[in-house]
Amino acid sequence: MPLYDFHCRDCGQTTELLIKASDTPLCPHCGSGAMEKQLAQIAPHMKTPGLIQKARAQAAREGHFSNYKPSERPRLK
């Protein structure tokens, strides 16, 4: 199921929802069914140097190397 951005015409809130394409969403804020699907810009998966750097910093804080290529991982003896 893909993520979609929806804008509620009744309360004016914009929400990202995970729904089936065939489902009609209800606004999580006011419960209205007057939701409009919005166009959302898709970011390339881990292709931006800033995203890679951020993911690597988080991995280092958490103590794992899942965001590094095998050739970049430290060698354990």
Image (cartoon, rainbow, N blue to C red):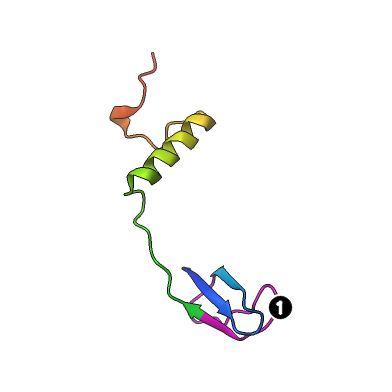
Q: Residue furthest top?
A: 77
Q: Residue furthest front?
A: 12
Q: Residue at x 54, y 75 (%)?
A: 6
Q: Which residue is mark 1?
A: 30
Seen in the picture, residue 52 relative to 77 is either above or below; the reply is below
Rendering coords of residue 46 (x, y %): 36, 48
Q: Residue at x 56, y 77 (%)?
A: 7
* Nearer to us in this view, 52 or 65: 52
Quadrant of the image occupied by residue 71:
top left
The residues colored magenta run 18-36
At label 1, which amino acid type do we have? Cys
Rendering coords of residue 53 (x, y %): 39, 38
Instruction: Indicate left or right for 31 with 70 as reference.
Output: right
Seen in the picture, residue 52 relative to 11 is either above or below; the reply is above
* Nearer to us in this view, 18 or 43: 43
Q: Quadrant of the C terminus?
A: top left
Q: Tell me, yes or no, whether the highlighted magenta stretch contains residue 72.
A: no
Q: Residue furthest right?
A: 30
* Nearer to us in this view, 58 or 3: 58
Q: Residues within 10 Å of mark 1 (few under 14, many from 20)?
A: few
Instruction: Indicate left or right for 28 with 67 as reference.
Output: right
Q: Secondary structure at mark 1?
A: loop
Q: Tell me, yes or no, whether the highlighted magenta stretch contains residue 35.
A: yes
Rendering coords of residue 42 (x, y %): 38, 63
Rendering coords of residue 61 (x, y %): 52, 30
Seen in the picture, residue 3 relative to 25 is either above or below; the reply is above
Magenta portion: prevailing SS class = loop
Total of numbered circles in the picture?
1
Seen in the picture, residue 74 relative to 36 is either above or below; the reply is above
Q: Residue at x 38, y 44 (%)?
A: 50
Quadrant of the image occupied by residue 68:
top left
